[in-house]
Image (cartoon, helix red, strand yellow):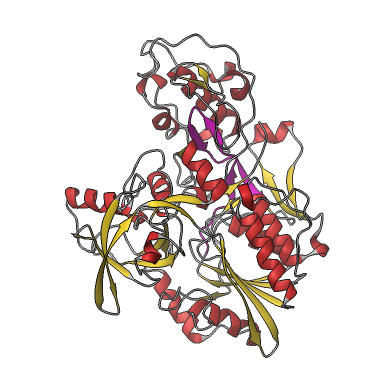
């Protein structure tokens, strides 16, 4: 399931993921909607509540699991309890390399075969202390703001690695992107685009009552679509509980249980209002595979053919879908493009660079798409990590949707592109805008201010949990990456939930076509920007930050 918002606003991401992000953001209610699925975050924090979120969590994608060569660790005496209360925290200066020494030593090792690698799980018998020490050593080595990690807590205070990890971050507002995912859920989501839920996304105005939560996307062939739900429907009750006005703890718990199902086959009722008429449906949770690329079409204008596509997730399956979309647009001879990323919270940076190449074409080849700037310790011992505009596919593993590595990418060869945005446009999506501007492609931004995530991770799995900790900031070919407050729109305009995405009369797309024709922001677009401030962003962990594949 996904979620959208406006102003810190209109965005769409999987609701379940949203919960993960919201967890990191200390928010309760912004997740809303139990839609397309997704796994939980570091804790099953519910979406409905009384405390509004601040900044959502960003979007990543998994790193292939390398085979470590760790140092043997003694057999645990207390594998599931708290760390030895009498043991002092280790001296950080003597920890050594986290991956060489502590990686995959687990209090409760998994057994069997990892379905995503086809290899045995790398887990070895270790202790809770080993898991905590790995997190501390890794954070000290790779966390972008490692020197801001607080020291006012001890390993002995923690019985769960995810709780300890939540403390290993800068206490400043700049890091709203620190979160975890069960590895099995993360792998399923990032490789296949599969999430547990009902298959819809929500725009959320606020966590507290009164709430006004509306559907933004309904996935085809999902429980939501089969039940007749549509974009623009307002959710008013879940399992008979008043979503608009509920405040009591038991009501909130019931709303969260209905919006965020925990198992395939769970059934919950949902009442929506459409044009003043109420409709109650029963939804059965399932693993929903959401398309990353939708609505590819060609719009005829007085000055030529304009391509349009909506792009919602930089994941592995998006590689094939983007190639197919651009082949279609190229074959129809478009001379301009509207790229709708209003609900795209980010993901794989290599997918972002491929997309940017398919827009710009051969004139961009070999140029810097994004340079990754790590902490001073990493920067001192390695050459610059650069992602370039490349003419061939990375070749992500995506099952039957996989693209062979080295496959030539189609391209439009444009020097101008229009991007539709909202506060749900984050991370890798912002990198597309910033990267194209870095090589002087004109990028006109129509919609809302983006969320402001110039940071990224390399997801790190350990003992069944995948950890996301900010490792780098991205800058373009001109060295610019200072957009932590978001990228401002050329024309500000609110999302139009009364029309389907791709409808030429939908407010954002209509404004984009109008601005393309005359270079002037329509008056209604300027005034409607106020509506963007009625909503704040709620987003999923995986979809809200840039992810970079880096072997350890």
Res 274 quadrant in image: bottom left
Q: Position of residue 198 (x, y in %)?
A: 38, 57
Q: Residue 94 placed where, x, y %? A: 58, 16
**Residue at 46% across, 57% down:** 13
Q: Nearer the viewer, residue 178 or 466?
A: 466
Q: Examine the structure image and report whether residue 533 is included in the region drawn in magenta.
A: no
Of residue 60 and residue 327, the one placed in the foreground of this image is: 327
Q: Is residue 482 above or below residue 302?
A: above
Instruction: Using the image, determine if residue 293 lies above or below residue 317.
Output: below
**Any part of residue 122 in sight:** yes
Quarter in which the C terminus is drawn: top right
Q: Is residue 393 left or right of residue 545?
A: right
Q: Estimate the x, y position of residue 173 in percent, counting from the top left.
A: 45, 47
Q: Position of residue 28 (x, y in %)?
A: 31, 50
* Residue drawn 53% across the image and 22% down it: 123
Q: Quadrant of residue 419?
A: bottom right
| Front in this rendered view, residue 225 or 505 | 225
Q: Nearer the viewer, residue 241 or 388?
A: 241
Location of the N terminus by quadrant is bottom left
Q: Is residue 472 magenta?
A: yes
> How many marks are shown on the rendered structure?
0
Quadrant housing residue 157: top left
Tell me if residue 126 comes above or below residue 460 in the rendering: above
* Residue located at (40% from left, 9% from top): 77
Q: Which residues are magenta?
A: 450-474
> Can see residue 416?
no
> Residue pushed farthest bottom?
302
Q: Is residue 191 left or right of residue 353?
A: left
């Amino acid at each position: 399931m996904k979620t959208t918002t406006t102003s810190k606003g209109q965005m769409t991401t999987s609701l379940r993921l949203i919960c993960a992000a919201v967890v990191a953001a200390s928010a309760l209610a912004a997740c809303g909607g139990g839609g397309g699925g997704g796994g939980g975050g570091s804790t099953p924090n519910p979406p409905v509540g009384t405390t509004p979120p601040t900044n959502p969590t960003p979007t990543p994608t998994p790193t292939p699991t390398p085979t470590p060569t760790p140092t043997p660790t003694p057999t645990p005496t207390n594998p599931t309890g708290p760390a030895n209360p009498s043991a002092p925290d280790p001296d950080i200066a003597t920890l050594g390399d986290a991956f060489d020494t502590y990686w995959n030593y687990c209090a409760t090792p998994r057994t069997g075969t990892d379905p995503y690698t086809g290899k045995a799980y790398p887990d070895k018998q270790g202790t809770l202390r080993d898991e905590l020490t790995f997190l501390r050593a890794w954070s000290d080595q790779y966390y972008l703001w490692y020197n801001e990690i607080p020291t006012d807590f001890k390993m002995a205070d923690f019985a769960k690695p995810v709780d300890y990890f939540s403390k290993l971050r800068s206490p400043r507002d700049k890091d709203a992107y620190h979160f975890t995912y069960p590895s099995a859920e993360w792998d399923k989501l990032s490789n296949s685009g599969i999430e547990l839920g009902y298959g819809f996304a929500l725009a959320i105005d606020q966590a507290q009552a009164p709430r006004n939560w509306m559907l933004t996307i309904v996935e085809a062939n999902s429980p939501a679509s089969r039940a007749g739900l549509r974009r623009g429907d307002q959710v008013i009750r879940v399992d008979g509980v008043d979503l608009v006005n509920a405040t009591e703890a038991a009501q909130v718990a019931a709303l969260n249980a209905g919006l965020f199902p925990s198992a395939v086959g769970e059934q919950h009722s949902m009442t929506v209002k459409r044009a003043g008429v109420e409709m109650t449906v029963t939804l059965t949770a399932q693993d929903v595979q959401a398309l990353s690329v939708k609505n590819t079409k060609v719009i005829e204008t007085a000055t030529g053919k304009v391509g349009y596509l909506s792009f919602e997730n930089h994941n592995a399956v998006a590689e094939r879908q983007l190639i197919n979309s651009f082949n279609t647009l190229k074959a129809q001879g478009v001379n301009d493009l509207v790229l709708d990323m209003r609900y795209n919270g980010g993901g794989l940076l290599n997918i972002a660079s491929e997309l940017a190449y398919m827009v710009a074409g051969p004139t961009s080849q070999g140029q810097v798409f994004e340079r990754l700037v790590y902490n001073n310790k990493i920067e001192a011992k390695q050459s610059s990590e650069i992602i370039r505009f490349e003419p061939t596919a990375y070749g992500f593993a995506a099952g039957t949707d996989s693209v062979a590595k080295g496959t030539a990418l189609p391209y439009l060869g444009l020097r101008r592109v229009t991007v539709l945005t909202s506060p749900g446009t984050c991370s890798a999506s912002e990198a597309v805008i910033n990267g194209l501007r870095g090589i002087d492609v004109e990028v006109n931004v129509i919609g809302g201010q983006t969320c402001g995530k110039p940071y990224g991770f390399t997801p790190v799995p350990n003992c069944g949990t995948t950890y996301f900790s900010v490792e780098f900031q991205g800058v373009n070919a001109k060295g610019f990456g200072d957009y932590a407050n978001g990228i401002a729109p050329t024309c500000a305009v609110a999302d139009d939930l009364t029309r389907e995405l791709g409808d030429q009369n939908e407010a954002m797309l209509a404004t984009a076509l109008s601005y393309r024709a005359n270079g002037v922001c329509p008056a209604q677009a300027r005034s409607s920007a106020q509506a963007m401030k009625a909503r704040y962003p709620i987003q999923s962990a995986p979809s809200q930050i840039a992810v970079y594949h880096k072997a350890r």
